[in-house]
Amino acid sequence: MATHEVVMARINLFGVLRSIQELVVLDASSHDLVKDTKLTVEFVVRGGFRGALKFCEGSCEFIEGRDSKVDIRLFFTSPAHFNRMIDGKANPIPLKGLFKIGFLTGPFTKLTDRLTYFLRPEEGLLEDPEFFTINTKLTAFVAFHSLSEVGNWDDLGRMSASGTPDGVLQMQVQEEDGPALAITATGGRLSTSVGVHPDYRCLMWFKDLKSLSQILNGEMDAYTVFAQNRAGIRGYIPMADKLNPILQLLPGYLS
């Protein structure tokens, strides 16, 4: 049985921090912060999970699990410790790369500030088209990666995930350059990947970013958007039916 702190820590690592790999692609200012950087930062949380951000001259790749070649290794004594760090209320314990900590206090902190700027927008910012696009794509990335963590670790989420038929549910925005993410269910376990899966079983489509944003931000319920033919589901519908209760649990973690 996983505690709320464990689920939250996994969301923070495998959903929120992972999205930095998308941030440096979508946001020119974030790209410039690490355009000359070549190093890997690993986050190790006591309790058995870890992940790393590998920066390479403007690009970023998230690596789940152990990475043997890391420049900075940060240790957290518990999931709660990691969550407090994400909230800016605690510091990590550096196990490696003490003399490279300047990257964390400089460019990396600016990156996470930039991420917060997009994911938690101040009033009026969503009216800017470029900001709106980045916000919606990042929010979708975090939400669908978090969905797998909730489905695998939250008690109620696991009940729904355990009954989900094996296969792939594809989420895709139809307009040009719209985001696409896939949820794969295998034996009651969920995983998220980026892009269009070649053999999905169920498709959840959105006409445009606005339709997706309205649902993700709670501005409009899915039934209304579906009724307006701005979104829909095709294929093996029971997959979506089983995953929907997990989606309903997300606001309790991401709000």
Image: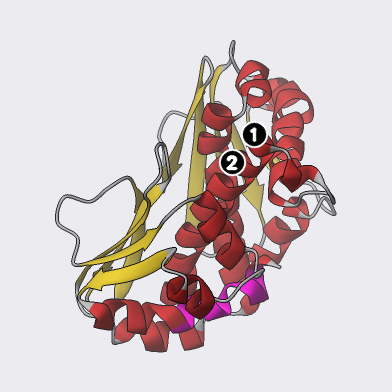
Describe the element under mark 1 as helix, strand or loop.
helix
The answer to whether 247 appears left or right of 184 in the picture is right
Picture quadrant where residue 89 is located: bottom right
Q: Main secondary structure of the magenta part?
A: helix
Looking at the rendering, the stretch of residues picked out in magenta corresponds to: 245-253
Pointer 2 residue: 133
Question: Which residue sits at x=68%, y=22%?
Answer: 29
Q: Nearer the viewer, residue 196 or 213?
A: 213
Residue 224 location (% of width, % of height): 52, 77
Pointer 1 residue: 130
Q: Are marks 2 and 1 in contact (CB under 8 Å)?
A: yes
Question: Which residue sits at x=50%, y=40%?
Answer: 52
Task: Please name the amino acid that badge 1 sits on.
Answer: Glu
The answer to whether 185 appears left or right of 73 in the picture is left
Would you say residue 247 sits in the magenta stretch? Answer: yes
Q: Nearer the viewer, residue 168 or 174?
A: 174
Q: Is residue 193 above or below residue 131?
A: below
